[in-house]
Image: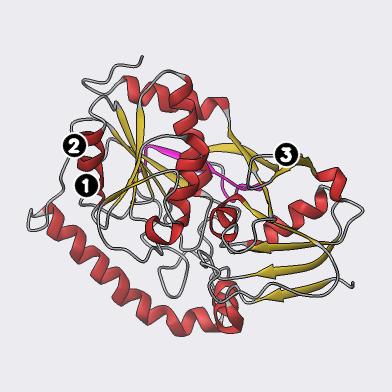
């Protein structure tokens, strides 16, 4: 079966926009006036919070917000899971809150082991599956934080998955995540990828990619696991798939990065299928014909296993540098009322 790329992740127009965000070319220049309007509305919202007309609400435990200033996935969810695992390893009782982007519900609810990702969001479902930490989702993250503390009053730290621009939730530490794009062309949406101006105040900067775009901040290593995981938890070495026809599927912000990592692990991809980020696979039709092994990301697996229980999930090993965690621990320890286990 010849190699083929079937990419419906962004579509031609969105792909051109992503390219435009890397340079200050014609398309970016045409969109620049709209970016001024976006920046003005963003500034107005900030003034409303500073004047107290919109209110920032705090909870009784330290809040760490992990987010990004650029549109499109920069790798914040692996950072959230790495931070949660680090705190758990130190004996800290930690919970996670999220909006639950892409879910079909609109209430505040706990993410459980058997929660349907369509009801809670694929990233919260993955975080719960990967860390076993309490996870709550709500449109207003402060509502999720309060529900989490009510249900798990011994919680010592809350990590917010995204929410850097969600000023309604007070925070003690902000972690800003960048991938290899850095700040792109440096312009605001829609002329560039920036949700807000950069530089801006931030406690920690973490680069999730392989080639940090600027010197400030800490780095992380990332690689695919040497084994794929079945729905029932069985592990299969990737090298066992090297001689088999493989179809790779990804519904993430940058699917090609996943495909390249699979190839680097020695897999020959007969076909790659890129779907929109957070796609729920309701309209996806499984390829027919020659027998093949279907592989996907961990985030996709929590949804895809409903339709393709034989799919294999390939976990991502993401490890921020020890210096990053040292800096995070120091900032946590300096907070009033915080006590590590």
Q: What distance separates the C-alpha of mark 3 from that of mark 1?
A: 38 Å
Tell me the SS state at disc 2.
Answer: loop
Please give the residue where the numbered disc 3 appears in the rendered image. 235
Q: Nearer the viewer, residue 300 or 17?
A: 300
Q: Main secondary structure of the magenta part?
A: loop
Please give the residue where the numbered disc 2 appears in the rendered image. 59
Within 10 Å of disc 1 (Cα), the crowding (few <14, some 14-19, many 20+) is: many
Which residue is pictured at 50% across the width and 42% down the height? 129
Q: Position of residue 227 (x, y in %)?
A: 75, 40
Q: Which residues are magenta?
A: 201-214
Q: Is residue 213 magenta?
A: yes
Q: Is residue 296 magenta?
A: no
Q: Nearer the viewer, residue 198 or 282?
A: 282
Q: Residue furthest top?
A: 341
Please give the residue where the numbered disc 1 appears in the rendered image. 142
Within 10 Å of disc 2 (Cα), the crowding (few <14, some 14-19, many 20+) is: some
Q: Earlier in the sequence, mark 2 or mark 1?
A: 2
Q: What distance separates the C-alpha of mark 2 from that of mark 1?
A: 8 Å
Q: Nearer the viewer, mark 3 or mark 1?
A: 3
Q: Position of residue 57 (x, y in %)?
A: 15, 45
Q: Residue furthest right?
A: 243
Quadrant of the rendered image containing residue 254: bottom right
Which residue is pictured at 72% across the width and 76% down the height? 6
In the picture, measured across the screen, residue 247 lies left or right of residue 9, that is: right
Q: Nearer the viewer, residue 327 or 147?
A: 147
Q: Quadrant of the N terminus?
A: bottom right
């Amino acid at each position: 079966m010849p190699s083929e790329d079937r990419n419906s992740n962004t579509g031609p127009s969105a792909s051109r926009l992503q390219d435009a965000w890397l340079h200050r070319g014609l398309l970016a220049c045409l969109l620049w006036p709209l970016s001024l309007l976006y920046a003005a509305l963003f500034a107005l919202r900030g003034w409303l919070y500073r004047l107290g007309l919109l209110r920032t609400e705090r909870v009784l435990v330290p809040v760490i917000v992990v987010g990004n200033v650029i549109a499109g996935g920069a790798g914040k969810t692996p950072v959230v899971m790495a931070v949660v695992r680090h705190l758990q390893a130190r004996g800290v009782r930690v919970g996670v809150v999220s909006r639950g982007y892409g879910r079909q519900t609109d209430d505040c609810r706990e993410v459980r082991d058997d929660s349907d990702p369509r009801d809670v969001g694929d990233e919260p479902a993955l975080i719960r599956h990967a860390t076993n930490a309490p996870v709550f989702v709500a449109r207003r993250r402060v509502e999720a934080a309060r529900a989490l503390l009510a249900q798990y009053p011994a919680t010592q730290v809350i990590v917010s998955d995204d929410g850097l621009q969600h000023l309604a939730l007070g925070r003690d530490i902000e972690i800003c995540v960048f991938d290899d794009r850095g700040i792109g062309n440096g312009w605001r949406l829609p002329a560039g990828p920036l949700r807000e101006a950069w530089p801006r105040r931030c406690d920690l900067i973490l680069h999730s990619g392989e080639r940090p775009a600027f010197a400030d901040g800490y780095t992380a290593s990332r690689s695919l696991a040497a084994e794929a995981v079945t729905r029932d938890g069985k592990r299969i070495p990737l090298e066992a798939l090297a001689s088999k026809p493989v179809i790779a599927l990804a519904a993430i912000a940058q699917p090609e990065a996943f495909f390249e990592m699979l190839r680097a692990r020695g897999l020959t991809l007969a076909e790659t299928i890129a779907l929109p980020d957070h796609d729920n696979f309701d309209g996806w039709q499984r390829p027919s014909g020659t027998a093949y092994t279907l592989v996907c990301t961990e985030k996709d697996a929590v949804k895809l296993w409903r339709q393709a229980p034989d799919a294999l999930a390939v976990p991502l090993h993401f490890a921020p540098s020890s210096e990053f965690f040292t800096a995070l621990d120091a900032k946590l320890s300096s907070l009033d009322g915080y006590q590590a286990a």
